[in-house]
Image: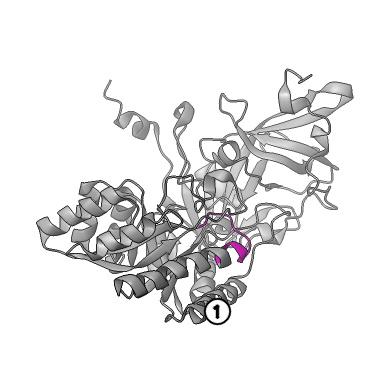
Amino acid sequence: MTHEAGWAHAPGALRGPSWLQPPRDANAIVPLLWSSTAHKTETGDLVVGGVPVADLVAEHNTPAYVLDEADFRARARAFRDAFSDFDVYYAGKAFLCTAVARWVQEEGLCLDVCSAGELTVALRAGFDPARIGYHGNNKSVAELRRAVAEGVGRIIVDSVQEIDRLAMVVQDTGLTARVMVRVTAGVEAHTHEYIATAHEDQKFGFSITSGDAFEAVRRITETPGIELLGLHSHIGSQIFDSSGFEVAARRVLALHARVSDELAVTMPEMDLGGGFGIAYTTQDDPSDPAQLATEMGKIVEHECRALGVAEPRLSIEPGRAIVGPAMCTVYTVGTVKPVALDAGAVRTYVSVDGGMSDNIRTALYDADYSCTLANRRSEAPPVLARVVGKHCEAGDIVVRDEFLPGDVAPGDLVAVPGTGAYCRSMASNYNHALRPPVIAVRDGQARVLVRRETEDDLLATDLG
């Protein structure tokens, strides 16, 4: 019989996942999970970018996102240099603000946007529109008109209706739209079903298997004012190896060759997607950019040789891999509650002053995170804890399982690494919470990139 409390009382629930082992030192951090400048002092204080987190909290309060600028830039350069023969597109949806858009451009990367708002931020930052790609499965006529007028470098076409809308826009304006055709290669990426995007039964792209992709290409080649750059494939997000790309590249390049043979059209570019994974916990083992570049380059070279076609100009989209590890979120502990369960077991709930309004991923994707005590050193033995938010939801979990010092107490600071991707982007005002600030740190200096929302912000759109 299923217990009425469900998973909370499942056998072995307090043992934690098999990959999570009790630490030798509950004060230590695992470097793989954190930005490159993050470290603990002898007194247990977490320091990022040369700035003690406790000092940031004293000035800016919690919760707060802390973005390591040097780490962000280093990861951007690592992808740029490793994929030197590719165009590398930073994922604006992961996290975007004016300053970050400038960093992306300064480090020589291109930029993906998927909404009018993201395009607005990019243009405000002075980002070269020719280096912007515009994604989205339901772009409106107004969005397409603006993208074409601004000179966006490529629009990733996702439906027959979008082709028709673009045809109308270019006819009305006399301008040219440069496009890529998003295709689904029928690859099952080993990731969460909500972030796997190359299987057939989902909203993105044209199916290669059904022939829809070829017909979309044909339609574009017959439409004046639309310049076809190539095919775009994306198998998903949080991908750790190149095996899925090999299958996808083979199928996409086969279509590329068919277009050349049957339509006598040479497409100069191809996007292989990316969505490379990062380490949220010790169970994750992300690949090095140089390794990924070598493997993906060999895949394309081999397939093009077999098909007898010239290699197109390639582009990739690292996704969360640049900004994800560069940011952490800092919270203040408010309540520590030991809860007695069956057979004398006890679960320690550590409640913090944020939650699913600033990080929905645990609830949405069943994502795993890690955390550390950030403001002091403790000699207490570690206990298996669950870090939860303050929202009125049982599923408001920040870190499902983590070992924290047994004396964690109200007023302590807890920091969660790997929150750069999608956390601030997907943040909400649930329970009328105020979204946290984003504070950049570098060389001992801190500056606010995105300020904390205020109650005036909250009420500004409420017309009463």
Classify 33 as above or below 59.
below
Residue 296 placed where, x, y %?
A: 55, 72
* Image point (54%, 41%), residue name: 359
47 relative position to 320: left or right:
right
Tell me what residue is drawn at x 63 percent, y 64 percent.
Answer: 241
Assign a secondary structure to mark 1: helix
Task: Check the picture and name the quadrant holding the C terminus.
Answer: top left
Provide residue 347's location: percent of width, then percent of height.
78, 30
Which residues lie in the magenta part? 235-245
Label the magenta part by its dominant secondary structure: loop
Instruction: Tell me the amino acid under the disc marked 1.
Output: His
Q: Please identify the residue farthest to the front as the structure is shown.
A: 262
Identified at 65% across, 62% down, the residue is: 286
Instruction: Report which residue position mark 1 lands on.
Output: 302
Please tell me whether residue 403 is drawn above or below residue 457 in the rendered image.
below
Furthest toward the right, the residue is 343
| Vertical placement of residue 356 versus 113, above or below | above
The answer to whether residue 317 shows anywhere in this view is no
> Is residue 375 found inside the magenta-colored segment of the image?
no
Q: Is residue 442 left or right of residue 5?
A: left
Q: Residue at x 68, y 47 (%)?
A: 371
- Quadrant containing the N terminus is top right
Residue 104 locus on image (x, y percent): 42, 66
Residue 109 screen position, x and y as percent: 42, 70
Q: In which quarter of the view is residue 341 placed?
A: top right
Please identify the quarter of the rendering in which residue 405 is found.
top right
